[in-house]
Image: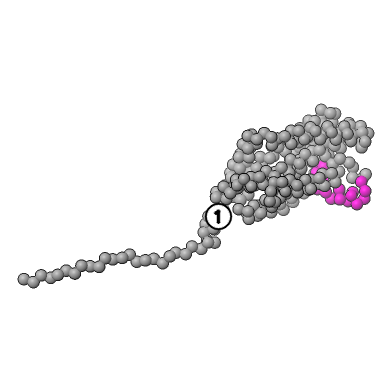
Amino acid sequence: MTTSATTPMAPTTPATRAPRRVDPSAAVARTTSHSSLQETRVQTLAMAWRALKKMRRKPEQFFDVLIQPLLFTAMFAFVFGGAISGSVSDYLPVLIPGILAQTALTVCMATGVQLREDMDKGVFDRFKSLPIARIAPLAGPMIADLIRYGIASVLTLVTGLLIGYRPGGGVLGCVGGVALTVIAGWSLAWIFTWLGTMARSAQSVQGISMMIMFPLTFLSNAFVPAETLPGWLEVFVKINPVSHVVSAVRDLLNDGAVTAEVGWAVIGCAVVVAIFAPLAVRSYSRKM
């Protein structure tokens, strides 16, 4: 009887696969957030709620909003009223719209400083790992700042009423003037937001912002009529966008009239947003 020997079979080894190459650009494209309009709106409101909670925990952020309108309105009225218009009551129709514009410009200047502080603290490093729209961390705090613009504008107007200002535009004119001031402050804040993404520190943002704020405010028709200035300076005052905002607010507060200046002011605000909002988002995306 013959026995057949079975030969052991060699163990099978799995076939080795070639290493898979990952295209870096494709990987970035798959992880980059492409939020819809609805998602962008929700994310922006979430960032606005975060900014509001910061304001509640840091009430010192309201010092410039609460104190500056009271101080500047009373100081400019009683110091310059008699010299420019002959009396404080005659100067208030000229002064109050100018103080509104100055207050909005000063308050929105803090937007860029706070943004730069958050970026220096590493807060935005956390945002870059989230699948959110790039504009949400920028637009959210600016929506929250609308409350600060509104408080500053209302306090300025109330201070003027307490010292004798009587707006001829009535309630509707006052509401329109305050609303236009808030819109102007929000649009100009995009300039300082862009500066916040470009500058290297919060101190440099504040310094650059002051260099922008003072010429725009004091080289305008906010405190003195443009006709009383030298010819070359009068030309600059007339093309200064702040002058258009001040003239529009004067027409609303003093006369209750929606004039061409109101239209030019709204168009100017839209142009500022159209230019500086994309610049701010692009600069922020590069920093990310």
**Front-lying residue, 86 or 168:** 86
Up-down relation of residue 272 to residue 99 (above or below): below
Predominant SS of the magenta segment: helix
Total number of numbered discs in the rendering: 1
Asked whether 238 falls inside the magenta stretch, the response is yes
Asked whether 194 falls inside the magenta stretch, the response is no
Q: Which residues are magenta?
A: 229-248
> Crowding near pointer 1: few (<14 within 10 Å), some, many (20+)?
some
Residue 277 visible in the shown view = no
Q: Is residue 130 left or right of residue 71?
A: left
Residue 231 visible in the shown view = yes
Under tag 1, what secondary structure? Answer: loop
**Front-lying residue, 74 or 246:** 74
Question: Farthest residue in the left direction?
Answer: 1
**Residue 68 occupies quadrant:** top right
At horizontal 72% and vertical 34% (from top left) the residue drawn is 63
Q: Amino acid at mark 1?
A: Thr
Q: Which residue is mark 1?
A: 32
Q: Quadrant of the N terminus?
A: bottom left
Instruction: State the image coordinates of residue 75 (x, y, percent, origin top left).
Output: 84, 33
Instruction: State the image coordinates of residue 268 (x, y, percent, origin top left).
Output: 77, 49
Instruction: State the image coordinates of residue 214 (x, y, percent, origin top left).
Output: 81, 45
